[in-house]
Amino acid sequence: MDFGHPAAIFVSSFIIGLSGAMMPGPLLAVTIRHASVRGFSAAPLLVLGHAILEAALVCLLLFGLTEWIRGDAAIIAIALLGSAMLLRMAAGMARDVRTLHFDAATGVFPGRPQNGKGSGGVRPVIDGVVTSASNPYWSLWWATIGLGYLLLSRGQGWRGVLAFFSGHILSDTAWYLFVGAAVSAGRGWFTDRIYRGVVGACAVFLVFFALTFGYLGVSRLVHIL
């Protein structure tokens, strides 16, 4: 894949972001909880909180941390670490795919009001920020895969950075809005079989991107030896 083109950055960022978003985690649990209480409107507010945190992190990386990440050694290390992280994600998804369950249709929490008035407008945004920031996996993802993608996309200027960030945020938005709609509507058509099939396909894509990242790192290493 030609990561020198913004369109390729956008598509790959979307697929990798979707792969991470679809796996069960704290933000998914919080989305189901809020959507079961407040309804669909909670989902975009949670995504907004998540996006605010990630936009702040991207700005920090662009205008601060990446200033000292220069030279082939840093790029090689980030590319290889990103490749290893993607392979780990793919292996974990492949291992868990047979036992995954999509419980959004029954995401009602006992003891919580079900009239859609149990959550203030600001609370889901704050929960989106706090839940994301407190997730160790989120920090690890940005320290490896996210940073690697940011360095690659920065080579295309602001077009590349915007392609990376918009693809990433769009993947979160698409998934969590779907979850919010499924919970609030009580739909049962998104079965475990479909869920597992989508996650399995994402795992295959992750292997491809891991090999691409690894190739970039190894080729740069061979070039300087």
Image (tube, rainbow, N blue to C red):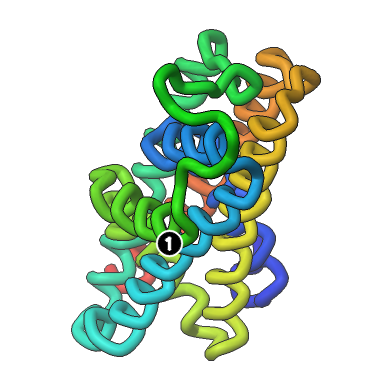
In the visual, does 191 lie left or right of 212? right
Please tell me which residue is depicted at 56% across the width and 85% down the height of the picture: 156
Residue 40, quarter of picture: top right
- Residue 72 coordinates in the image, percent (x, y): 29, 75
Q: Name the one closer to the observer, 107 or 59.
A: 107
- In this view, the residue farthest toward the top is 99
Which image quadrant: the N terminus? bottom right
Which image quadrant: the C terminus? bottom left
Please tell me which residue is depicted at 28% across the width and 81% down the height of the picture: 66
Q: Where is mark 1, residue-wise? A: 122
Residue 129, quarter of picture: bottom left
In the visual, does 194 lie left or right of 69? right
Element type at mark 1: loop
Please, is residue 188 above or below residue 201 in the view?
Answer: above
Q: Name the one closer to the observer, 148 or 50.
A: 50
Please tell me which residue is depicted at 60% across the width and 17% down the height of the picture: 106
Please tell me which residue is depicted at 37% across the width and 66% down the height of the picture: 53
- Residue 224 coordinates in the image, percent (x, y): 31, 73
Q: Is residue 188 visible?
A: yes
Q: Amino acid at mark 1?
A: Val
- In this view, the residue farthest toward the right is 189
- Residue 16 coordinates in the image, percent (x, y): 55, 49
- Residue 44 coordinates in the image, percent (x, y): 59, 56
Please, is residue 88 above or below residue 105 in the view?
Answer: below
- What crowding class fits label 1: few (fewer than 14 Cα within 10 Å), some (14-19), or many (20 or more)? few
- In this view, the residue farthest toward the left is 68
Q: Name the one closer to the observer, 79 or 108.
A: 108
